[in-house]
Every structure is written in structure tokens, then in C-alpha cells.
Amino acid sequence: MLVLLIAIAFALITVDLRGGEQSPLDGARSGAASVLGPVENGVASAVDPVGNAISAVRDSGGRHDRISRLEQENAALKQKLGSEDRNRSRAHELDKLLKTAGAGGYGVKGAQVVAIGAAQGFSWTVTIDAGRRDGLRRDMTVLNGDGLVGRLTTVGPSTSTVLLANDPDFTVGTRLERSSELGFATGRGGGALNVQLLNGRAKVNKGDRLVTFGSREDKPFVPGVPVGEVTKVNRHKGDLTRTVSVKPYVGFTKLDVVGVVVQPPRSDPRDDVLKSKKPAKPRPAPTVTVTSTPSGNPSPRS
């Protein structure tokens, strides 16, 4: 049977080839195409998704690797961009710190805040990445480019704890910029300080600025470090002292780069650091007015 079928197939092929365009099998071929064409399309529609799925599964490993590689490159670019922004911010903070230290004549050891709070139980402290190995000792002044940050309370081999100036247990002697009135500033646990002036009749106004008065042998405080500006003056009630509210220059919730004063100034800078912080006064622009002459021609006058 198989041999017979093969012989018939060859015979039909021979007849078809010899007939050319006038092949007697064209009608049968057309009829078969009409019948089998829709079947072939249906089978192809059913089989193609399966083939595509098989190809997708086969290529999924390569796609996953490409996606992973792109995701890693994207993360690396984001990290690089964030690092550049952070480096620029630190460079700006360091530049301000060096300007403040230069204006006051302070020798400082730069450090970075690495933690907030400490095991000692202080409510407002930070930890910096410098310690005894860097020449630091207890009761050294800590500042940044804006002003007074605090003082060292605990010094370890490679880290130290800083008691911030806004802590309720913090106290520092102060001096008013113009009148040189002395007082004591204490923290209020937030973004403000209370300053008790020793002279109950001292003339003080909103916006007056204060610096540190300094301590004996410059420990724990060196003189001339900016503290803050007066925001509120309590009414005088005949007391021996007078209390004012002061907004510190330092933002204690966003500390990063700080400096520990390891070498005090040779002489008291007094208000020199504050003077270096004064913004340049804008020069008034010349004005031009136009007046009319008797002849009617305008004449400019400056």
C-alpha cells in the first residue's frame, strides 16, 4: 500500500509538472487551498502564541540580565548624583567653618556628626568621629560655620560626645555686640536660648547679636564665637538682672561638619567674627530726573 501511494504521488507530480500552467491538477489544488486555508490559519493562530511564549521563556534570562544591568546602572547614577550633591554641601560647610575659624583666630580640628543622642542620657547631644587620637580633650569648644555648637563632654579614642548649646543643662557666658553687656545663656531644649543679662537696666533691642565671653584658660569656651540674635526682650520690672530670648545661629537639627577648637586665639577677637558675617550693604543706584528749561528743552539732572 505504501509503495502504491508513493507511485501515485510521483505520477501526480509528473503530470502536474508536465502540464505547466494548464495542469489538470490546478482545480484540485485550488479546492484544497479553499478548504485547508482556513484550517491552516486557525492552526497558525493557535500555535503562534505558544511559539512566542516558548521564545519568550527561552529569552527571558537574557532580558532579565539586561533589566538587572540597567537597574544597577540607574542606581549607580542616582548614588553618584546624590554623592556629588552631598560633597558640594560638605565643601560649602567646610568653607564657612574655615572662614569663621580664620576670623576668630581659632585652630580647629574638623569632624563630622555621625550620630544623634548618646548613652550618657543627655537630651541634646551628638557624636562626632574624632577623639583622643585626634588630640581632643574634654571641655573643648565646638563650632561650625554659623557659630557655637556646644562643648565636648565625653571623649573616646575615636569618637566624642558634644553637648549642644540648646540643651537645658548647657550654660555659656555671653557678650552683647555693641554694649559689651555680659550675661549667661542657657538652652531651652529647642531652637531658642534664654540669656540673663547681669545688668538689669541694660539697653538691649531686638536684633542685637551676642558672642561667647570666654572661660578661664579658654575651657570650656573660647571668646568671640557667635551665639545668636535677640528675638524678644522681656520688660524690665526692677530686677537686678534682665532676661532676653535669643535665636541661635546654628541649626541643631541639621548638623554635619563641625570644628573642635584645639588652639584658642592669641587675643580675644571680641566682635570680629560677627563683623565678618555682616552682609555687604547695597550701594544706592544713581537717580536721574528731567527738568524743563525755559527754552522747552529737557535738561537731565542727577
Image (cartoon, rainbow, N blue to C red):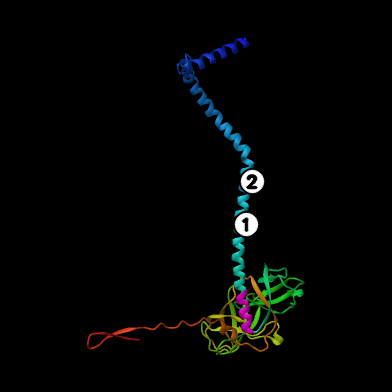
Q: Which residue lies under the disc numbered 2?
A: 65
Q: Regarding mark 1 in the picture, which secondary structure is present there?
A: helix
Residue closest to the eye, 247 or 147:
147
Q: Position of residue 111 (x, y in %)?
A: 68, 73
Q: Which residue lies under the disc numbered 1?
A: 76
Residue closest to the eye, 31 or 84:
31
Could one spot residue 182 in this view of the protein?
A: yes
Q: Position of residue 261 (x, y in %)?
A: 69, 80
Range of magenta residues: 94-104
Q: Regarding mark 2 in the picture, which secondary structure is present there?
A: helix
Direction from residue 49 to residue 165 in the image, left or right: right
Answer whether residue 95 is magenta in the image: yes
Which image quadrant: the C terminus? Answer: bottom left
Residue closest to the eye, 148 or 130:
130
> CB under 8 Å between callouts 2 and 1?
no
Which image quadrant: the N terminus? Answer: top right
* Residue count near mark 1 (Cα–Cα under 10 Å), binned few <14, some 14–19, many ≥20: few
* Residue for point 60% across, 62% down: 82
